[in-house]
Amino acid sequence: MLSAETLAYAKSKIRDIPDFPSKGILFKDITPLLADPRAFHIVLDSLAERFIGEHVDAIVGVEARGFIFGGALAARLNASFVPARKPGKLPASVDKVTYTTEYSTAELEIHKESFRRGARVVIVDDVLATGGTAKAAANLVAAQHGEVVAYAFVIELSFLKGRGVLAPGRIESVLDY
Ligand code: AMP
């Protein structure tokens, strides 16, 4: 377990941007955290240690910021990395879902046959807000007969109650607001 001081250091690198991308949204900007090697390490250590001793076959990272943390976590957990992308970006045949976020309606795609049946999958994104994005990614995993063993986030906006949307799924988040 990382100390409260260590986690507070990482949290100090999250920048609040009011009214982005639209009025009323307080955007959690992770770029100062990415620019700080210690802070980036802290969040990856915190996420990785939660899966010590468990087998994870694949990380699904949600475009685009989920790629940054998901890719790094996949390398640490010796798991494969599967990108969940916005429409029209993946070159081969895809499965697709439509979902809503805190501020938009969107679609996500993953390549067909991304997992073997029963694969143990962790879904990774930077922020858990309403939970719609992570739930959509989970639906794609389920459609391909993978098992979502956990959702992992750097930031959880608890006041938006995304946990309820992902229930009874296991949720790991590093920094709570
Ligand atoms: P949701 O589907 O509502 O849980 O939204 C999660 C997705 O939207 C993630 O991919 C986040 O990157 C992004 N997102 C939603 N709300 C915020 C926020 N306040 N700050 C930064 N990113 C956000």
Image (cartoon, rainbow, N blue to C red):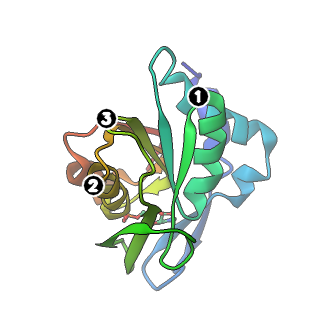
> Closer to the camera: disc 3 or disc 1?
3
Work out whether 117 lies above or below 28: above
> Closer to the camera: disc 2 or disc 1?
2
Q: Position of residue 113 (x, y in %)?
A: 42, 52
Q: Position of residue 168 (x, y in %)?
A: 19, 40
SS at circle 3: loop
Q: Position of residue 106 (x, y in %)?
A: 39, 77
**Residue 143 shows which numbered tag?**
2
Q: Which residue is mark 3?
A: 118
Amino acid at circle 1: Leu
Task: Looking at the picture, tell me which residue is in the foreground, 136 or 89.
Answer: 89
Give the spatial CA distance, label 2 vs label 1.
24 Å
Write the residue at 34% across / 50% down. Answer: 141
- Quick one: label 2 or label 1, which is nearer the N terminus? 1
Amino acid at circle 3: Gly
Would the CB of label 2 be found within 8 Å of ligand 1?
no
Give the spatial CA distance, label 3 vs label 1.
18 Å
Amino acid at circle 2: Ala
Q: Which residue is mark 1?
A: 77
Give the spatial CA distance, label 2 vs label 3.
11 Å
